[in-house]
Image: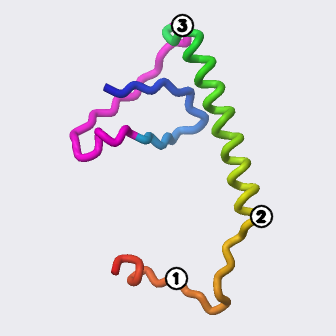
Amino acid sequence: MYRQIIIPESNSFLLNLPAYFVGRKVEIIAFQTDKEDIPESDLRKLVNERHDQKQRLEKLLQFIQKNPIRLPRNYRFNRDELYE
């Protein structure tokens, strides 16, 4: 069983499942819960995880800006070559 409690910031959410779920039937249920149902330690963990994600994203964006990918001037993406 895998349980994750989140406080969404938008109406979409990307869920990364554990590797042992791959290839199996998985049921995903989402429902609203009261904050009283979530232990205080879990709430702190949620806030810290969200803060850590924002810091990682900021570092990633800084890295990408400092290290841009340089492609040849005449480069064209060929979707057919992608699947060969």
* Residue type, mark 3 in image: Glu
Question: Contact (CB < 8 A) between labels 1 and 3?
Answer: no
- On whether residue 21 falls in the magenta region, the answer is yes
Quadrant placement of the C terminus: bottom left
Q: Is residue 35 left or right of residue 73?
A: left
**Residue hosting label 2:** 66
Residue 74 place in picture, x, y as percent: 62, 92
Question: Contact (CB < 8 A) between labels 2 and 3?
Answer: no
Q: Estimate the spatial distance between the alpha carbons at disc 2 and disc 1, rounded to whole Å.
A: 23 Å
Vertical comparison of 62 with 80: above or below: above
Tell me the element at label 2: helix
Residue 56 place in picture, x, y as percent: 67, 44
**Residue hosting label 3:** 36
Give the crowd class for mark 2: few <14, some 14-19, many >=20 residues within 10 Å.
few
Residue 18 place in picture, x, y as percent: 37, 38
* Residue type, mark 2 in image: Lys
Q: Is residue 46 left or right of residue 21?
A: right
Vertical comparison of 76 with 18: above or below: below
Vertical comparison of 32 with 35: above or below: below
Tell me the element at label 1: loop
Tell me the element at label 3: helix
Quadrant placement of the N terminus: top left
Q: Main secondary structure of the magenta part?
A: loop
For the point 40% across and 25% down, the residue is 3
Query: Earlier along the polypeptide chain: callout 2 or callout 3?
Result: 3
- Magenta part of the chain: 17-36
* Residue type, mark 1 in image: Phe
Query: Earlier along the polypeptide chain: callout 2 or callout 1?
Result: 2
